[in-house]
Image (cartoon, helix red, strand yellow):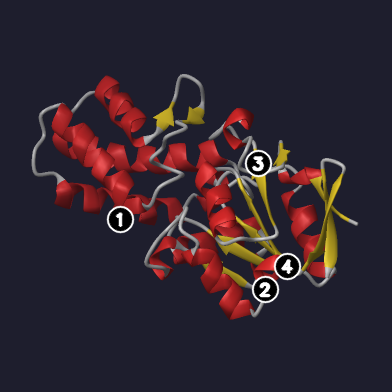
Amino acid sequence: MINLKVNDRIIEKVRLVIFDKDGTLMNLYHYWSNMVDYRVEFARKRLGFNLKQKSEIMFLMGVDFANERLRNDGPVGIKKREIVMAAMEKALLAIGFVDTHDLCLKAFKEADEISLQHLNEIIRPVNGMKELINFLSKCGCSIALATTDKTQRAKLALDVLGISDKVDIVVGEDMVKNYKPHPDMINFILDKLSVDKVNAVMVGDAITDIEMGNNAKLKASIAVLSGIASKEEFVGKTEYIISDISQITVV
């Protein structure tokens, strides 16, 4: 077991650290703004709406171009794929396009395929990511990933980040019945790795990450200020709030 130091406080006897992916291990805005752009551009080429409308659709899907961030209420980057797709359909309906479900399915599939050629460009690690993951692994601490992304997509991201061999298990929203903030992902991970909840820590940048850790009754949940949620929103949900994961150290 290891001890983690966060903001001059010590979290003792940790055997497992569970990370969110987007905004915690990799840059949130850069990845998802590109993914949403691929999706909406596919629809624009087929439906013919203008660039201003494209920007409006992307905003309703969660991309705030003006402030170069994702919207705090998502849905992209926070909620599962089906909810983001529903937001795209609703946005298209608002500008006069009906029955776009099949088109949106194709847009998401096409974006997945396009992104495979650009993963090295759109996936950027956050400050201190590799150093922390490598040190946790070196110290014998188990590492898991719990993400609202599809499991296979998440594994591809870990390959690009260069940490696949350090992560013991990856759990996407497609592997559980209930996604964040329900504790299903964490309970699945604890069971597979045979780790008790009192020896596990959650690290994430969304309110739902911290609530998931709390609902699973983990030893601690560490909130990362990626911009998707404010410090004030985390107060009362966790005692541990950091700018990025470089502020987590092993002692």
Residue 196: assigned label: 2
Q: Which residue is mark 4?
A: 199
For marks 3 and 2, give the CA distance. 23 Å
Q: Which three-letter amino acid code belongs to the residue tagged 3?
A: Val
The residue shown at (42%, 34%) is: 73
Give percent across and percent down for residue 138. 83, 68
Between circles 1 and 4, the one closer to the viewer is 4
Label 2: few (<14), some (14–19) or many (≥20) C-alpha neighbours in 10 Å: some
* Circles 1, 4 touching at the beta carbon (< 8 Å): no
| Secondary structure of the residue carrying numbered label 1 | helix
For marks 4 and 2, give the CA distance. 6 Å
Residue 109: assigned label: 1
Label 1: few (<14), some (14–19) or many (≥20) C-alpha neighbours in 10 Å: few
**Residue 167 seen anywhere in this rendered image of the structure:** no
Sooner in the amino-acid sequence: mark 3 or mark 4 = 4
Q: Which residue is mark 3?
A: 224
Give percent across and percent down for residue 223. 65, 43
Sooner in the amino-acid sequence: mark 1 or mark 3 = 1
Q: Which three-letter amino acid code belongs to the residue tagged 1?
A: Lys
